[in-house]
Image (tube, rainbow, N blue to C red):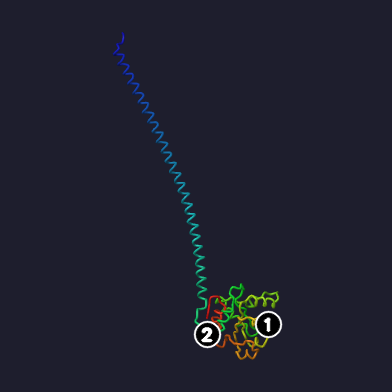
Amino acid sequence: MAMSASEYNRRMREAARRAERELQREVDRVNRANKKAVDDYNRKAAEHNRREADRVNRENKKAVDDYNRRVAQHNRAADRHNQKVVDEINRRLATAPATRTVTYQPVERELVERVHGAIDFDDGREYDVFLSYARIDGEDTAKALATALEARGVNVWFDTVAIQPGKSQSLQMDAGLRKARAGIAVLTAAYVAGRFWTQRELGALLNKPTLIPVLHGVTFDDVKEYSGILPDLAGFTTDQDDIDTIADKIAPAVARHASP
């Protein structure tokens, strides 16, 4: 039986609708599969990223912790060093002689001002003063005076410190005289009696306008009777002042920026 045109067209439309539905179902299936694949990928990527972020954070935390530990160690070492410096400064301040006001006799002030004015502080010499004394009766006084002057910033050539064993003593003393801008002679009984070394040193010091006499156990009359080579008989005496006071009086004479 022949199919009419209208039936044919109906069946064709029905077949087209079935094909369209099948195609849509396939498209939906493919979209669902793609979505699942994308979701799975995103889930795995997120998990990977989370693990990688955790790893990087752990490494960064370790690096920061290591850095902070090194900084803390450095700071502790710096604190210990700074505390040592502060303690040393405090120790020096505690042991440094207190600043005292000294009173000069007119002849003492004149001597200090003359010596200070005669010194060339830019001559490059190594020592501020050469300390001359007779060992038999002046060593203790000379040593105390050298210590007191050094505590006041005066660089003292003192034989018990400067003389090197095994080398010519006379040459080393001559070198010390040349290296010092000024001289201090601790005049004692043995000194004024004219022992060889003290005669040699005093002879060299007398050529300087920067000689500072310090009398110990003798008087200016004794010194005058000895030779009369100290024409103004100016100086300091342990009969009148203690060693610290004498050092306070002498230091301004041989220090660059001081005055009595």
Amino acid residing under circle 1: Arg
Depth check: 233 or 76 in front? Answer: 233
Q: Seen from this angle, which residue lies furthest left?
A: 6
| Quadrant of the image containing the N terminus | top left
Amino acid residing under circle 2: Tyr
Q: Which residue is located at x 36 percent, y 24 percent? A: 23
Secondary structure of the residue carrying numbered label 2: loop
Say which quarter of the image contains residue 201: bottom right
How many residues crowd mark 2 within 10 Å: few (<14), some (14–19), many (20+)? few
Going from the N terminus, do you reach mark 1 or mark 2 first?
2
Depth check: 232 or 239 in front? Answer: 232
Secondary structure of the residue carrying numbered label 1: helix
What is the x, y in percent for residue 4?
29, 11
What is the x, y in percent for residue 184?
61, 81
Q: Which residue is located at x 53 percent, y 75 percent? A: 257
* As drawn, 169 above or below 224: above
Q: Which mark is residue 200?
A: 1
Q: Which residue is located at x 46 percent, y 47 percent? A: 56
Depth check: 20 or 178 in front? Answer: 178
Say which quarter of the image contains residue 112: bottom right
Label 1 and label 2: CA atoms lie apart by: 30 Å
What is the x, y in percent for residue 139?
62, 82
Depth check: 153 or 228 in front? Answer: 228
What is the x, y in percent for residue 213?
60, 84
How many residues crowd mark 1 within 10 Å: few (<14), some (14–19), many (20+)? some
Q: Which residue is mark 2?
A: 104
